[in-house]
Every structure is written in structure tokens, then in C-alpha cells.
Image: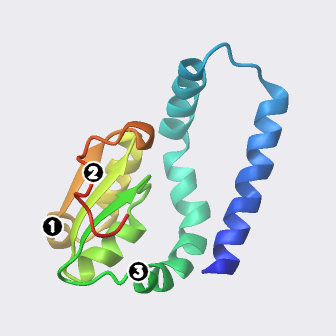
Amino acid sequence: MRACSSQLRSSWRCCTVQLASRRSFATAETFHQMEHRNWEKAAAAYNKGWGPLTSQCIPEMLSSLQCSSSSKLLDVATGPGFVAEAAAKTNAEVIALDFSAQMLEIAKQRMDPALSSSIQFVEGDAAALPFEEGTFDCI
């Protein structure tokens, strides 16, 4: 997982630096709106491009979280739902959160209907989680 995490952090920093150097945002809300618009547009491409890399890290991540059938897991920024899907296969209680409705739709369509029906999909912002503290065993 460390190799995967390291690669993702490096890619994220690179993209963030490039974005910051190209644009100036008047407020955090302006940035948030731009970010939301872009994720809505990029949902399908993200699924195809990052899905295989993300999937490689999931077993080790769930193992390190000690995710099991008795766990209540929140998958923040679920995207295409790979982590939520794997956690649901362990019979954990899973909530998949993303601020892109398009990402949530891809996650639902990509999964077996019986499995996706066991996951609660929530459109929401990771910066303002709509849950009480202590609700989840794994995040």
C-alpha cells in the first residue's frame, strides 16, 4: 500500500501544483465549485484511468483497517466505488460518499446489483461530512 499511496500522493501534488500555478481563485467556494464541475465531467475517464491502480491497493488497505463483517466503513471520495465494493464483499456495512453524482452513478452501474444494493451511496462533501463523530469503525 505504501508504494500505491506514494504514487498517488506524488501525482496529486503534481496536479495540485500545476493547477495552482495556472489559476487564481477568489475564494475557497470558487475552487470548490470548479472542482465539483471537473469531477462531474471526468468521472468516466477517472474510472478507466485510475481504476486498475486503485484496485491494487484495496486488499492491503482493508486489511490494515481490519475491515470485517462487523465493521461500519465510510468510503470517502468513493469515486467508482472500488473500495466500497471490496468492503461490501466482506459483509461490512458500507457507506460510499462522493461529491460527484456522476461518480456515484458509475459506482452503482459498475457493481453487481445485489452487491450495490447493500451499499448506501451518499452524495456529499468530504470537507463537511454529514455524519456524527464516532459513527464508523473504518474511514
Within 10 Å of the Cα at label 2, are there few (<14), some (14-19), or many (20+) other Cα atoms? few
Q: Is residue 129 above or below residue 81?
A: above
User: Which residue is disc 1 drawn over?
Assistant: 118
C-alpha separation, residue under disc 3 versus residue under disc 1: 18 Å
- Verify CB contact (< 8 Å) between mark 2 and mark 1: no
How would you rate the neighbour count of disc 3 (Cα within 10 Å): few for under 14, some for 14-19, many for 20 or more?
A: some
Q: Which quarter of the rendering shows the N terminus?
A: bottom right
- Return the residue at label 3: 62
Disc 1 crowd rating (10 Å Cα; few below 14, some 14-19, many 20+) is some
Residue 8 screen position, x and y as percent: 67, 64
Picture residue at 26% right of the left edge, 46% below the top: 122
Q: Nearer the viewer, residue 74 or 120?
A: 74
- Of callouts 3 and 2, the N-terminal one: 3
Q: Is residue 94 above or below residue 96?
A: below
Relative vertical location of residue 64 with respect to residue 95 in this rendering, above or below: below
Please name the colour scheme applied to the rendered image: rainbow
For label 2, the SS is: loop
